[in-house]
Image (cartoon, grey):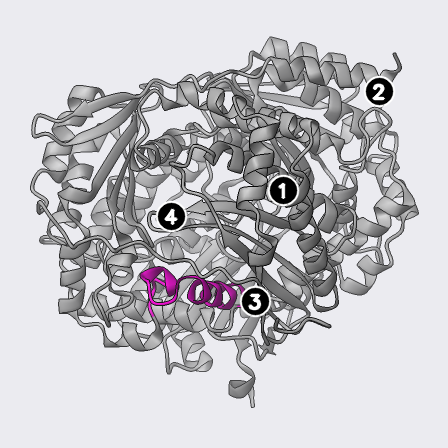
Amino acid sequence: MNLRNLWRAAAVAFAFATPLHADINIQPVTSPGGIKAWLVEDHGIPFTALEIRFKGGTSLDAAGKRGAVNLMTALIEEGAGDLDSQGFAAARDGLAASFQFSSDQDGVSVSSHFLTENRDQALALLHDALTKPRFDQVAVDRVREQVLSGLRSDAKDPGAIAANLERARSFGDHPYGSDGSGTVESVTALTRDDIVQAFKDAIARDRITVAAAGDISAAELGVVLDKLLGDLPATGAAQPGPATLQTKGGITVQPFPGPQSMIIFGQGGMKFSDPDYFAASLLNEILGGGRFSARLMTEVREKRGLTYGVSTGIAAYDHAEVLVGQFQASNEKVAEAIKVIRDEWAKIAKDGVTAEELANAKTYMTGAYPLRFDGNDTIASILVGMQDLGLPPDYPKTRNARVDAVTLEDVKRVASRLIKPDDLHFTVVGTPTGVANE
Amino acid sequence: MFRTFGRSIGRSLFGLLALSLPASADTVSSFTLDNGLQVVVIEDHRAPVVTQMVWYKIGRADEVAGHSGIAHFFEHLMFKGTEKVPSGEFSATVEKQGGTDNAFTTQDYTAYFQRVAADRLELMMQMESDRMVNLNMSEEDVTTERQVILEERGQRTDSDPGSLLQEQMSAAQYLNHPYGIPVIGWRAEIAGLTRDDAINFYRAYYAPNNAILIVAGDVKPDDVLALAKKYYGPLPPSDKIKPRARPQEPPQLAERRLVLADERVAQPYVARSYMAPERNPGDQKQAAALAVLADLLGGSGTTSVLTKALQFDSQTAVYSSAYYDGVSVDPQTFGLVVVPAEGVSLADAEAAMDKAISKFMQDGVNPQDFARIKTQIRAGQIYARDSAGGLARTYGEALAVGLSVQDVQDWPDVLQAVTPEDVMAAAKLVFNRDQAVTGWLTTKEAAQ
C-alpha cells in the first residue's frame, strides 16, 4: 500500500465514525396560557435567543398594497407605546438587547436575543413593539424612503432584475410572482392606514411559531410566552392559496450593460412532505449543492474556469416548490456554461448518480447536520423552521437515519421523476455573446 | 437559497466591526512550537464541533510590485493538491466528513479554515500541515484557476460600480503604501501571473514560522498541542521570513476628490476616507477611541450622530454610517458614507455630512450615547462567547497583524477605559481633509 492509499484509508476510517444523529435535547413547552414553544436549554452563557415567526409574510399583502407587509415589518421597531423611534432604539441598545424584524414570502420573523440580567425589561420592550407599535407618520415616511432607495437600486441590479423576471415567469399573478418589497409606485402610494391594516393581517396568535435557546428554564419560558404574546389578537388575514408554477424550458435574455451576465436557472421542485424528499435532496447535493465537489461546480468552475461559482437548491416554499440555481459569468462564456449545465441536467436525469457520489453526499449531509446547531440564535431559528415543517421534537435524532436509508435506486428513480431537461429555463441578465431567447 | 462562494477577499467598504470582542482568558491557551508555529486553543465544549484555522502573515501588501493579486491567486491554488491529497480532494475530503472549508485573503494575511466534528481534527491537521510545504500544482491547474479569478474579479469588482469606486478611492488614499492596490489585483496583472510566480511566492512565505494555528471548539489544549507537534512540528522553518517593512506614507498634504459615473448606478452616494492609526502591540488606546468614535457617529441606524442629523433632524439621507476596523499592520482609514434622499444632490449631502461632523466637534460626546455604547461593549463580550468560530477569527486576525494574545484580551478593557476626551482627541487627529479622499458615486446622467 503506497502513501496515497494509506491516506485514503485514514479518511475512510474517519468517515465511518460520523455521528449518527444531532445530540440536541429539544423540550416542548406549553405556557400556562396555552402558547406552545420549543426550547433548548443551555445555561453556559447568560443570554437567551428567542425566535418568533408569523406565517404569511408578504404574501398577505392586500390587492394593490404590494409592499405593505414589508414596510410594516421594517416599522415595528420605529417606536412603540410611549417611545418614539429614537426612544425605542435608545432603550433597546441601553439593555444591549437585539430585536430584528424581517419578512419574506411566507412569514414575518422576529429574531431577538437579550441578557439574563435584564431579560424582563428587554421583553417588556419587545412586547410593546409587538402590541403597541406607533407607526408614526414621520417614521412611515422616513422608512418608506429607505425602501424606495432599495427598490431603485434593485432596478439596476442584475441579480434583482433576474430574480424579479424569474418570479414573474414562474408564478404569474400569485404573490410569489412579484417582489414582496413592492414597486416604487405601490410603496409610494401606501398610507399609514395600510400599514396598520398590514400589521393586523400579519401579526396574530393563530399563525405563530416560537422557539428559545439559551439561559432560560421551561417554567421561565412559559411565563415569558404569556407575557409577550398572550394579548396578541387571536386571528389575522386568510393565507393565500397554492401557486401554480409555469414550467416551460428555454432562455430569456434581458439586456443589461457590464462585463458579466447574471443567470438564474430552474424548474419544478419537490415538497418537503414528499416521501422522496431526502432522495431529491441528495440528488441536488450531488448535482449542484454548495460543495466544491458537486457536479456543476466541478464542470463549470474547476474544469473550465467559466464562473466563480454555481450552485442549485431545492426551495420548498409554503405554496410552491422549485429547483433553482444561479451563476455569474463573463458575457463570452455564458453560452458554454449554459450548454454544460444542460448536458449535466440531461445526464443525471438519464443515468442517475454513482454509488460513490451517493456515499459521499450521504456522509456530507449526515456529518454536516449536527454542525448546524451552532449558537443560541441559530438553534432558535432552526427550531422554528422544524415546527413550521410539522416535524416532531425528536427529529434531529432520526433525520440522519432517513438520509442513510436512501438507496441508489431511489435516487435514480427520483432523478428521472424530478429532473426535467425540457423544463429547465435560464433567465439571463446581461449582454451574453451567442445567446438568444428560445 | 443561494450561498455565496468563498475563497474570497476581505476588507469590504462597509460593515467592519471594530468592536469585536474576545473570550475571557481562562478558555484560551497559547503555545509556540520549536519551528516557530504559534498555536492558540480556544475551548468551547457546548457542542462536539471544532474549527481549525491556519493564518499566514502574508497578504496583498507584501507582494512584489507588478504582481498584484498573487497572494489571493495563490490562496486558490492551495486547493490544487499534493502528492497525498490530489487536486480537489482537500475540499472533497472535508465535505465527506460533513465539514465546510474555505479561505480568504486580505492586505495583511491569508487564512484557511475547516469546520468539522471535533473527532475529525486530526485528519484536518494532517491535510493542512501537508499542504503547508508539499503543494504540487500543474500548469493546467494554474491556467484554469486564473480564469476563475478573472471571473471572480468580474463578479465582485467590475460588475459593481460601488466596488470600483472603493478601489479607486484606496488607490488615491495611499500615495506610497501598498494598501492602495486592491487585494484581488489589477486585471492586467492577474492575467500575467504564472505558475513560477506562484511557486516562488509559496517557497518564500509558506512556512511554520510565518503562520498561526488556531483551534477553537470542543478540544483540550494538551491534545491539540500533541497533534500540532505530530503534524506541524516536523515542518522546517523558512530562513526568508523577515519583519514586514513596507514603504510608508509621506506627509499627505492635499485633499483628493473622485467622481465615478456609471450607467449601472441607481443610488448615488458620497464616501469619505481619512488616514487613521491602527491597533499596535501594547498600544491600543488611540484605536479604541476611534472604534468608539465610529460607533458614536454611525454605529446605530437610529441614534448615531450622523443618522440623527441627516435622517431625523433633516431628511437629507436615507442611510449614513461611519466605519473603522483597527486591525492592520500599517495605518489604515476611518470612513464615512452618506446615501442621499431622493432629490438631494451629492454636494448637499456632503455639505450636510461635514456640518454634522463640525457640530459634533463643537458639542462633544453625548453622555447618554456614550453610556449606551459602553453597555453594549460589555454585553458584546457575553454574546461573543456564543461563537467559537468567531473567536477563532478575532484571535487569528489580530495575531496575523502582529498583535499578541494579551493585546486581544486587553482590548475590551482598553475600550471600556476610553473617555469622552479620548474620543474627541482621536476625532481631532483623524478629521484632517488634507489626508482624506472623498468619492462620489453617481449616475451618468447626473454627471453630465
Mark 3, mark 1: which one is toward the viewer? 1
Give above or below for A147 relative to B199: below
Indicate left or right for B17 with A259 as reference: left
Q: Is residue B42 among what the camera can see? A: yes
Q: Secondary structure at mark 2?
A: helix
User: Observer-nearest residue: B317 or B72?
Assistant: B72
Query: What percent of the width, then of the height, locates residue B448?
Result: 56, 90
* Range of residues picked out in magenta: A158-182
Q: Which residue is mark 1?
A: A287
Asked where in the image residue B167 lies, by quadrant, the reply is bottom right
- Mark 2 and mark 1 residues within 8 Å of each other at the beta carbon: no
Sequence-first tag of 2 and 1: 2
Q: CA distance from mark 2 to mark 3?
A: 47 Å
Residues marked 2 and 3 touching at CB (< 8 Å): no
What's the amino acid at mark 1? Leu
Q: Chain of mark 1?
A: A
- As measured in the structure, the alpha-carbon distance from the residue carrying label 1 to the one carrying label 4 is 21 Å
In the rendered image, residue A173 lying in the magenta stretch gets the answer yes
Q: Which one is nearer the viewer's eye here, B448 or B373?
A: B448
Q: Closer to the observer: label 3 or label 4?
A: 4
Q: Is residue B398 visible?
A: no
What residue lies at 79% left-to-right and 29% top-to-bottom? B132
Tag 4 or tag 2, which sits nearer the N-term?
A: 2
Q: Circle 4 is placed at which residue position?
A: A317
Q: Are marks 2 and 4 in contact (CB under 8 Å)?
A: no
Name the chain letter of the residue that bears numbered label 2: A
Task: Find disc 3 in the rendering and name its residue.
Answer: B162
- Occupied quadrant, residue A353: top right
Residue that mark 2 sits on: A4
Of the two numbered discs 2 and 4 in the rendering, the one whose residue sits closer to the viewer: 4
> In the rendered structure, which amino acid carries the disc numbered 2?
Arg
